[in-house]
Image (cartoon, rainbow, N blue to C red):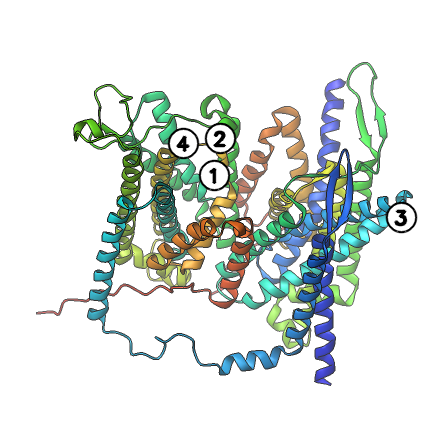
Amino acid sequence: MPDFLYFLQQLINGLAIGSAYALIAIGYTMVYGIIGMINFAHGEIYMIGAYTALIAITGLATLGIAWLPLILVVALVCAVLVSSSMGWAVERVAYRPVRGRHRLIPLISAIGMSIFLQNYVHLAQGSRNVGFPALIQGGFQFGDPDSFQTSISYMQITIFVATLVCMSALTLFISHSRIGRACRAVSQDLGMANLLGIETNRIISATFVIGASLAAVAGLLLGMYYGSVDPLFGFIAGLKAFTAAVLGGIGSIPGAMLGGLILGVSESMTSGYLSGEYKDVVSFGLLILILLFKPTGLLGKPEVEKI
Amino acid sequence: MMAAQNVKHALFCAIITLVISYPILGLKLEAAGIRVVLTGADASTLVAIVAAAVAVFVFQLFRDTIFKGLGRLPSFSPLANREPMSQEKRARVESIALILLLMAALTWPFFASRGSVDLATLVLIYVMLALGLNVVVGLAGLLDLGYVAFYAVGAYTFALLHQYFDFTFWQALFVGSGLAAFTGMLLGFPVLRLRGDYLAIVTLGFGEIIRILLNNWTQLTGGPNGIGGIPDPTLFGMEFGRRVKEEGNISFHEFFNIPYDSNHKIIFLYLIALVLATFTALVIRRFMKMPVGRAWEALREDEIAARSLGLNRTSIKLSAFTIGAFFAGFAGTVFASKQGFISPESFVFLESAIILAIVVLGGMGSQLGVILAAIAVTILPELAREFSEYRMLIFGAAMVTMMVWRPQGLMPVRRIPIKLKKAE
């Protein structure tokens, strides 16, 4: 029984991290689905979201406001606002001018943007990690109090609920709203959508803004979950989320969700049963294996090479 | 109508500038004991933020006019309107310039200070790395973001072989770079089937895996503590230290009967790096003229067309990858010997990004451009010490600017022509 409870604990931890990865992965998968490029600076946008949320929380604490729902809502709004503006600006500055050129060029420009943003925050806020207050504490515990107890913290429940809400909202938005329909049209055929009178530039900007907003939500959640942020916070998380997007099939939104969960669980199982140091090795190894044997991912459509 | 739209757009851009810069730049999180407090930035930062927003507003408002004006300006370059030199004259001028450059590079360390020679050695290591990566990224068009892994393989091979089997620099140089090339081949074999952007991510993941392994395999690599005591190169068995460390060797100053000078070692290391960098440049230049070099460029330009002409995609890409890795191993061995101590700290992703920035700034594929960019990127931060913390910020911005404005680099590549002999 304790063995099972231990397994259950790893599963819960993995699902919590995994659903946050899924939120970040949406940004990669949507951008890739529409313009076929990897938004390398997405991890940094997520990191900026976490920083902004922390700045808002600290600001409210200085003003003496302690009502939790208000703090969370204000932090969320600030993080989403700043991150989505950043996403919009990054697209305008670094991606739009190089769109349609040779494949390497947008990728290098995106890497440059990522390095720039990392150092922008590093210079402005210092390289040391800053403590993120644990606003949501406590949790449920079950199992025999004498041996191993499985616990689900309220924070983990918040992550599940928030992810579920965001994902449902996004699915509804993509399938029912005007912009969502335009997004689907653009991802099927950009040139044709343009001919039919869709303002493709505006849709591409909207994609970046949506992806950045979800990344900001993930930034707030994971910042609280880990308890600290630093300027390098986004780099590894971005890579993991990209892995999740590829794992699920890049371009597919349910795929990103599935990929995030699988990645989160496999990571926490590695930490639980092998060693915490090797969890990054496992997720990168997983990425390499997926790309080698099933480059389309679990739910992706096969890509036909056009001549 | 048009003007009103322009004003709206410019205002929107200015507001976005404020939103993305004020929270991060204007408010600073500081740890006070266990609590985190928020402090406002000083007035000059606020003025700068507002000035940036105003600048964006003005630029967006008069964007069309500014671009029109820029188009009308005459070209800045005095060489733009000159007739291109004839092929032979150009080749002659180039070879004279190269010989002069090499002569200068050979003689100046004897008159320069110790610190600058040491820095020059580092520059040469970056030249080797950038020339190697140039084969992979610039010529073959394969974006390798984990290039530093092969550099690490070279450096760690030397360190470990010395620790366990007492290898010298010269023995380790070829074993190390051979092993790096072999690693490149092993990685390249499965991943080169992937499309460009997937390849970039896989190589990035590979680089991270190598670094994590070096960091955690404590019994073998010493983990984060690294490996020390790596010996300097020897000249035909002569050592450059004051006292001889290995049995059977004699020291340089005793052999030539000159007083001991600690600068000899630094200069010798520099000269070795210079010879190896020249070797790297010449070998790669040779490859560029060979059919395989042409095939790299053909695959980069149009993979489908190249394949339909019968080029074997996998073996050609693999050769570029292996050669690039080989020279990274070369540079790694020299680096280990120069530092005398290595740890996983030296092989982080940032290092890969710097080497990539050098290749991009120099002009992908262009050897001379890459060499000049390596010199600039390594020396400029040393000259402008007060700006050194902005180094990576400027790199990032420069990479974006180059891609937007001049993707061919500062010195675009020129195809090396070959004259065909006339048939008798």
Q: Name the residue under label 1.
A: B347
- Who's the residue at 49% across and 40% down the image? B207
Q: Is residue A294 left or right of residue A209?
A: left
Closer-to-camera residue (B196/B230): B230
Cβ–Cβ below 8 Å for labels 4 and 2? yes
Q: How far is disc 1 from disc 2 in space, using C-alphas?
A: 10 Å
Picture coordinates of residue A263 (x, y %)? 65, 39
Q: In this view, does B314 lie to the left or right of B72?
A: left
- Who's the residue at 8% across and 69% down the image? B424
Q: Mark 3 points at which residue?
A: A70
- Who's the residue at 69% across and 50% down the image? A48
Crowdedness of circle 2 by 10 Å Cα count: few (<14), some, many (20+)? many
Closer-to-camera residue (A156/B11): B11
Closer-to-camera residue (B74/B354): B74
Q: How many numbered discs sit on the rendered protein? A: 4
Cβ–Cβ below 8 Å for labels 1 and 2? yes
Marks 1/2 same chain: yes
Furthest residue toward right: A67
- The kind of residue tagged 4 is Tyr
Q: Mark 2 points at which residue?
A: B214
Crowdedness of circle 4 by 10 Å Cα count: few (<14), some, many (20+)? many
Name the chain letter of the residue that bears numbered label 3: A
- The kind of residue tagged 2 is Leu
Marks 3/1 same chain: no
Depth check, mark 1 against mark 2: the one in front is 1
Image vertical order of residue B115 relative to residue A208, above or below: above
Image vertical order of residue B80 relative to residue A125, above or below: below
Image vertical order of residue B69 relative to residue A243, above or below: below
Q: How far is disc 3 from disc 1 in space, using C-alphas?
A: 44 Å
Q: Which mark is residue B156?
A: 4
